[in-house]
Image (tube, rainbow, N blue to C red):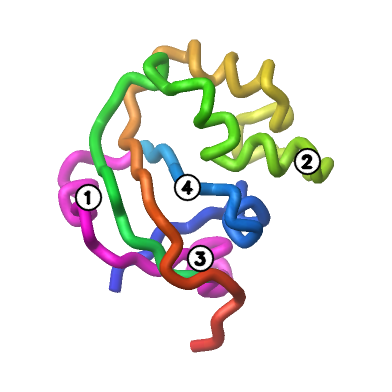
């Protein structure tokens, strides 16, 4: 089973507040992720001692310019949850924080990323 790591926003995922993620995937890698596919959700990569935290079903996987990201994705990306909880953005994330202003700075970056919309099938820390 394929995996997606939510290293920067796993807390929002576990709270049920994250339903979309954007990725800097190569097209070939992205082609492995198709609508309807069930994917393991991890708090960080297994290469870095990550743990499985759920299973998601992919609803949409497509490449989009980030400027087209709707305002509602502030919550769907988990930014709102992370900001309200006072969780600091890791330096490696490239974000200064999870504020609305930082979300908009990201949106104006001009990037084109893979958008993955999903629904939770199973959420929670899962052994094995």
* SS of the residue under disc 1: helix
Task: Identify the magenta region.
Answer: 25-53
- Label 1, label 3: how many angstroms apart (C-alpha)? 18 Å
Q: CA distance from mark 4 to mark 3?
A: 14 Å
* Residue 20 at x, y percent in the picture: 44, 43
Residue indicated by mark 3: 42
User: Where residue 104 sits: x, y (%)?
Assistant: 58, 16
The answer to which of marks 2 and 3 sits earlier in the sequence is: 3
Question: Which residue, given by chain and number where applicable, does mark 4 sit on?
Answer: 19
Element carrying mark 4 = loop
Graded by Cα atoms within 10 Å as few (under 14), some (14 to 19) or many (20 or more), the crowding at tag 2 reads few
Can you tell which quarter of the image residue 102 is in? top right
Residue 88 image label: 2
Residue 117 among magenta residues: no
Q: Which residue is mark 1?
A: 29
The image quadrant where one finds the N terminus is bottom left
């Amino acid at each position: 089973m394929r995996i997606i790591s939510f290293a920067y926003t796993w807390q929002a995922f576990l709270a049920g507040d994250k339903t979309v993620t954007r990725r800097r995937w190569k097209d070939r890698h992205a082609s492995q992720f198709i609508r309807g596919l069930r994917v393991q959700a991890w708090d960080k990569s297994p290469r870095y001692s990550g743990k499985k935290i759920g299973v998601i079903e992919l609803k949409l996987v497509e490449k989009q310019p980030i400027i087209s990201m709707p305002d509602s994705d502030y919550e769907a990306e988990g930014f709102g949850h992370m900001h309200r909880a006072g969780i600091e953005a890791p330096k490696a994330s490239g974000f200064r924080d999870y504020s609305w202003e930082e979300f908009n700075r990201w949106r104006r970056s001009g990037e084109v990323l893979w958008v993955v919309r999903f629904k939770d099938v199973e959420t929670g820390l899962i052994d094995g």
